[in-house]
Image: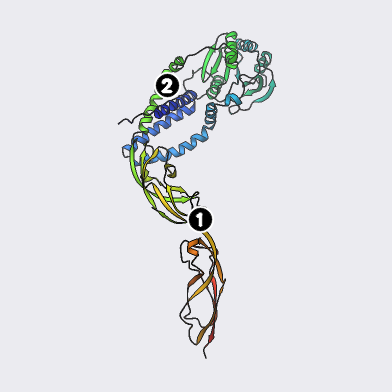
Amino acid sequence: MVPVIRWQDVADIIIMSFLAYQLYSWFRHTRAMQVLIGMVFLVGVYFITKNLGLFMTSWILQELGTVLFVLIIVIFQAEIRQALYRFSLLRNFFGRQDGGGLIDLADISSTIFRLAKERTGAIVVFQRHESLDDYLLHGVPLDSIPNGQLIECIFQDGTPLHDGAVIVKEGRITQASCHLPLSMKTELPRHFGTRHRAGIGLSERCDAAVVIVSEERGEVGLALAGELEAVATAESLAEKLQGLLYPQRQEKVHISLGQRLVSNLVPKLVTTLVVFVSWLIITTKQGAIFTVTVPIKFHNLPGNAVLLKSSPEEVEAQLKVFSSLIPSPKQLDVVADLDLAKVREGSNTLAITESDLNLPLGVVVTSVNPSVVKVSISKKIKKALQVRPVLKGTPSGRQRLQRVRVEPQEVVVEGPEHVLAGLDTLNTEVINLEGIRQSTVVESRLVSPSPQLRILNDEPVRVRIVTTGRR
């Protein structure tokens, strides 16, 4: 039976669909997406084998899933860090400004097409919002205003810095001869060499604009988000770069909400359908109610108080489960943990609320029986009690008991005031005098008359037994 859909469920599906589509858009041409598809396949196989009772296969896949999760975090830490950066709502306030300083894009575009005409290969990377530091290797640091003459000199065949990419960051050329990460896409054309794979690979991982000049064909391409677009003229390239690096200076094109919704409609519909099916699977147990026995424990008892009695010691709680991903509450260690910070001396009645039970997300309390707990609180005091040795029997042979001395003669006991009010002495364990033939010292432990009392220095006392011979 399909569970009743609340407005919270609709919001849940919309939010997860948006996040899932964003992840798909960012990672669809990367290794992370390929690994994710493989993990989804393994998860599907796991659930199928588990439901079919294939215990060994499902157990191996379950254990393998834990290892794969750790490996993915280690291997794809750069992609995960970049995704978290893209999710950040404050990056536009505290991050870099669009495009940095002003660049003569017309001059640079003319130089790039001149290099293409001369069949000189080149890669020029323009950093936009996202940092490139995690993807650049072996670059030579520079600090210069970008201009066509410098770029043409760098990429001339035979110069020390011609092999690699030039990085334009915040209106400056910051590095040359940089190595870029190669694309992992298998559907790239065969004639694309290392230069094209490097430029496309960087654009897959960040939002940089990468201009690629083909040495073999004399063509100019602009790589964005893993896609390479051919550019025919220098004017067209300058216009595209202007729009990418300085969007605030371009005439804003109004895109309605409807146009935004219908763009890339098929991936959005598929993502929403997958999220909805996942929601149905997760909520298949919605409304299931379990009755569990919940023990009661306490915390935050004031230092000057002692708990005498609580009733009851456990309650019956009815729990409602909203997700099949949550194990049965009967398998959970549910405890009612009550706060005693505000109790007073005497009898107190404490109500048991849902916040007192340590429940996982998706489990709510429908009822608790009984719903209150009565606790008796007494004032805690300290009192010095005389130590009284407890003796049994008589010494052996012709010995007789002359005197007994205890060290220490008194100890401090802590406990309820009404219990200590009637006590003046504290007995030792029974000391058997039979077998004692001469004066000796015996160690004996103290016996507490009540479990509510605590002996502050609970060490064995020394009982000195002095005997004399009978006449």
Percent across and percent down for residue 191 are 51, 17
Residue hosting label 2: 268
Tell me if mark 2 has few (under 14), some (14-19) or many (20+) residues whose alpha carbon lies within 10 angstroms of its own.
many
Label 1 or label 2, whichever lies nearer to me, is 1
Q: Nearer the viewer, residue 314 or 230?
A: 314
The quadrant of the image that shows the N terminus is top left
Label 2: element kind? helix
Q: Nearer the viewer, residue 364 or 304?
A: 304
Residue at (63, 27) in percent of width and height: 138
Q: Position of residue 262 (x, y in %)?
A: 43, 16
Q: Amino acid at mark 2?
A: Lys
The residue that mark 1 highlights is 305
In this rendering, does residue 401 appear at all? yes
Lateral position of residue 338 relative to residue 461, left or right: left
The image quadrant that residue 170 belongs to is top right
Q: Could you tell which of marks 1 and 2 lies nearer the N-terminus? A: 2
Q: Disc 1 versus disc 2: distance between alpha carbons?
A: 62 Å
